[in-house]
Image: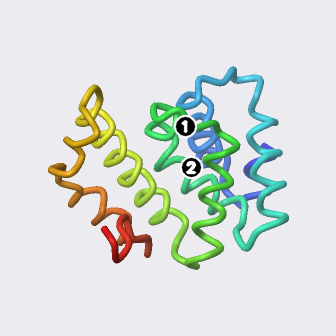
Amino acid sequence: MKLATLAGLDFKDATSQMTAALRAFHMDMSEGAHVTDVYAEVAAHAAVDVQGLSEAMSATAAIANSAGMSFEKTTAMLATMVEATQEAPKNLGTAMKTILARFTELKNNVAGTADSEFDDLDYNKVDKALKSVGVSLKDTAG
């Protein structure tokens, strides 16, 4: 109910978004107040609202957790992306999901390889995902 009130959502949508975060990060259902408190605290200090954070989190929570990120860190990263780009939070949640998936794929592809083998890797998928949010994977020196 608190999330619905803060985010201006109906109870069905608020419950769905809350459940997505709790389940993806393997939190107990009793930690719902913590989720709402994190959203409210971050929204109070960034140019993003609670509704935007909860929507973005719904899109990226599962992959963020599987990549080893915490709920709090993921929320902060999403807020930073929204604040810096002023893009729709839901779109940025989807972009972050793609970026994390590409990094996970890259990590899995290079596990156990020697450093010299990194020169031949195809970074195109990761590079494309990062460029979609204005970040370059390589500098002018490679």
Few, some or many residues within 10 Å of mark 1 (<14, 14–19, 20+): many
Amino acid at circle 1: Ala
Q: Quadrant location of residue 72? A: top right
Residue nearest the observer in this picture, 79 or 56: 79
Determine which quarter of the picture holds residue 32: top right
Cβ–Cβ below 8 Å for labels 1 and 2? yes
Q: Provide the residue designation for mark 1.
A: 20
* Element type at mark 2: helix
**How many numbered marks appear?**
2
Residue 28's x, y, as percent? 69, 20
Q: Position of residue 90 (x, y in %)?
A: 50, 62
Tell me: 2 left or right of 21: right
Q: Which mark is residue 57?
A: 2
Q: Identify the mark nearer the N-term, 1 or 2.
A: 1
Residue visible at 55% across and 78% down? 85
- At x 52%, y 76%, the residue is 87
Q: Left or right of 54: which side holds 137?
A: left
Judge the density around disc 2: few (<14), some (14-19), many (≥20) Cα neighbours within 10 Å. Answer: many
- Element under disc 1: helix
Residue under the point 46% across and 31% down = 66
Q: Position of residue 78 (x, y in %)?
A: 60, 58
Which residue occupies the extreme front position in the image?
A: 116
Say which quadrant the N terminus sits in. Answer: top right
Image coordinates of residue 38 in percent, x first then y, are: 78, 46
Q: Which tag is nearer the camera, tag 1 or tag 2? A: 2
* Residue 108 in the image: above or below residue 95: above
Above or below residue 91? Residue 134 is below
Give the amino acid at mark 2: Met
